[in-house]
Image (tube, grey):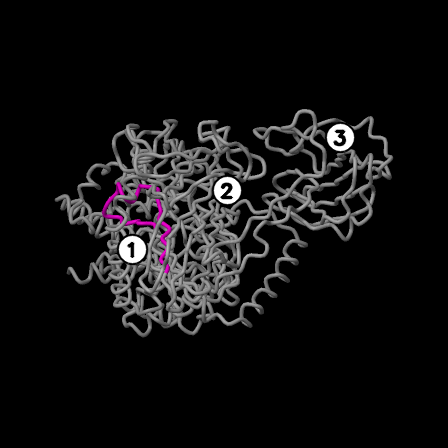
Amino acid sequence: MMKVKNFKTNKMRIGLWLFASIFMVFAAYAQDNSGRKAPAYPLITHNPNFSIWSTSDVLTDKTTEHWTGVAHGLTGYLEVDGAIYRFMGMDVPHYQTIMPPDKEESKTAVKYNEQTSANGWQGLNFTASNWKEGVLPISDNKSVPGTLWESDNIWVRREFSLDKVDKDKPLYLKLHHDDNVEVYLNGKLVFEKEGWNNRFEYFDISSKANGLLRTGKNVLAIYLKNTAGDRFLNFDLVNKLPSDKAGVAVAQQTGVDVQATQTVYTFDCGGVALKVSFTSPLLMDNLDLLARPVSYISYEVASKDGKQHRVKVHQQVSSDLAVYMADQQEVEGWAYKDGGLSILKTGTVEQPTLQKGADDMRIDWGYLYVAAPASKDVKQYLSGSRADKNAGPYRGKSLSLHTEIALGTVGATPVERFLTIGYDEVIAIQYFNQDLRPWWNKNGDRTFESQLQAAVADYEKLMQDCARFDQTLWQQANEAGGEKYAHLCALAYRQSIAAHTLVEGPEKEVLWLSKENNSGGFINTVDVTYPSSPLYLIYNPILLQGMLNGIFHFSESGKYPHPWAAHDLGTYPRANGQTYGEPMPVEESGNMLIMTAAIAQAQGDAAYASKHWDILTTWTDYLVKEGLDPKTQLCTDDFAGHLARNANLSLKAIMGIASYARLAEMLGKKDVADRYRKIAEEMVPKWMAMADAGDHYALTFDDPNTWSQKYNLVWDKVLDFNLFPKEVAVKEIAYYLPRMNRFGLPLDSRKNYTKNDWILWSAVMTEDQATFKRFINPVFRHALETPSRVPLNDFYDSTNGIRENFKARSVVGGFYMKMLADKWTAKR
């Protein structure tokens, strides 16, 4: 859903955030953005679990990340005549605890107190004999092994003994806390922080802890205060281990290009030029290919100085791609051959399949694969793995999967090699308590090695197909809205797709299930499907059916017994029924009706609607009764609070009723079509009168001093309903233009924040290309200038470009509304 949900705030947090944000904006404006092509660059993009990005314009400036921001390291080196150049990622820092492990190695013992503590509680000689004993982590989540904490304050002591103290090594505090924290080492304050974090962070406390550690007994003492929401504490004292690649040269990046299915970098590495391409062949006309979770990394090397050079590629992939919390979960790995492939495989030892569902979550079941065509020039191994390949799997934490590819002697003629990276989820989704395999293995009769074999066999053809598709998409988007619009569409393509998982349902139906990334983690959210729909209506409406099928089933099965459509099907990856606590009756019912009519338009018949006619009728009748002048209820844009009499929500109801009339007409139900068309027509003048605010139409019917984007009106044009006089859209657009800020048109008159997907929908209501581009230009500017370096953020402040919330969401598929409108207009 497109709302801010379940966020903890306090004055101190907001103040610090504003200070940091303002600083970031000025820094962003001061830099030269001419080299930036994206706020974050897609590298490996398949589904919410297998989604890796670079959040820097230079591939070597940062560790590559999962969309949640956690390191999912891809690190590449090119060896040229014995010299090593790093061209991809950074070495992930590794740390080693200085605290001796407890007897039971999986648990760390502490003493704690939830009452007001006596003076000196943090000191070395304090007697805590009357404190409770527990183990880390400490939290209020009863499903997490550890110590339960449900009060607002907790004091914690961990005593440990050292045989020696290494004063030359920097000391780090490894800390995951929620929320306000004070940390004492042997009685002295060494760290404090207002707020919380959502994973382990490493804080250098060397200067404050200088001279505090001693041989013999030590104590790390922590006070934690909960101000709202969740409670959590886990901690350690660690040293940072030196990197064996510290002295390696960094390749000079000379270019980067982002297309729909590929991101391509170029580098200078001494005497050779290197091109590295990341390709995820997400071609939607082939569901089997779309669902194959295998990407390519291609390397092309050529001499640039006229000389011959000996060249070798070294690619490292972290096993952290297969874990939720890297420093808490052990993995095992294998190196083996299968047919003509050399393969590395890794996954967690525990394999807790589908046991967790949350927003900020990485997969910790299934297996990561790195494979390349086997030859004498290819060598694969795991860090520290045994020389004897029959000795069994190698176990550890944060292993590195190494692939070395010798290119031999390279001259002016380019030499190309590639490898594949894939992920087998084994079980992908739980759907109304039934576990579903990924689409590629829906019958349970395929091995993942077969997918790797197919990917290698298809490599040359798919690289050509992807290049052709990227070029065609760019040309069509450029014709629709210009180069800046085409660039936005290219950025949105993989991101939208990679927020979904494809599975086959119990009735052999397609299920294309989204995760509501970074806004609750819900699965199959209807008001996330709605803005994303144009992309799928263009390239494969079966996928849009796959987003609606589960919602239809939820109501038609009686599991959702309301006369309106549900909001979601659960929390990803468990689609067992709505988990968001508040309904959105007009919003979701209108969305479902409009999208069903759009599917009929795309397919040229209403057969899909016919299968769901009874529930569509129920939802339409609800809109007839409640939609014209909506009472106070949640809608998708309620970031500043709920509204009654929401004019844009009313527009959605009118478009939903008109959609039902269109479907009835296509199904030969003339009486029904005429009756509901008349209802929609009669609502139009009432809407115009209630929303009239002189030179524009109001945000709410009862306040002419407000305004909002009326993006739902776009369907009157795109679906050719022709219900509203053209003057309505003309008046709205004229009112919007002088209110455009540096990074786009605000969502409404209440705040400066905006939604870029809705801006691009509103832009389609314009009548000429020049005006359309006035909407596009600031959204394009935001992609290149925002200080929020995350996969396309759709909710941000339109004046400073700072992310309000949300990232990596599927809604950017809505950027394709102009292409959809042009495609359907051309057919009329």
Q: Residue at x 50, y 29 (%)?
A: 349
Q: Is residue 501 within the magenta segment?
A: no
Q: CA distance from mark 1 to mark 2?
A: 63 Å
Whether tag 1 and tag 2 are in contact, CB under 8 A, the answer is no
Quarter of the rendering containing residue 183: top right
Tag 1: amino acid: Met
- Say what secondary structure mark 1 lies in: helix
Quarter that holds the C terminus: bottom left
The answer to whether residue 649 is above or below residue 734 is above
Tag 2: amino acid: Ser
Closer to viewer: mark 2 or mark 3? 2
Q: Earlier in the sequence, mark 1 or mark 3?
A: 3
Q: Earlier in the sequence, mark 1 or mark 2?
A: 2
Q: Label 2: how many residues lie within 10 Å, few (<14), some (14-19) or many (20+)?
A: many
Quarter of the rendering containing residue 651: bottom left
**Numbered tag placed on residue 111 in the rendering:** 3
Percent position of residue 540, x then y = 24, 48
Q: Is residue 282 within the magenta segment?
A: yes
**Numbered tag placed on residue 276 in the rendering:** none
Range of magenta residues: 280-301
Q: Label 3: how many residues lie within 10 Å, few (<14), some (14-19) or many (20+)?
A: some
Question: Which residue, given by chain and number where applicable, does mark 1 sit on?
Answer: 683
**Numbered tag placed on residue 400 in the rendering:** 2
812 left or right, relative to 120: left
130 left or right, relative to 795: right
Quarter of the rendering containing residue 112: top right
602 left or right, relative to 535: left
Percent position of residue 86, x then y = 50, 56
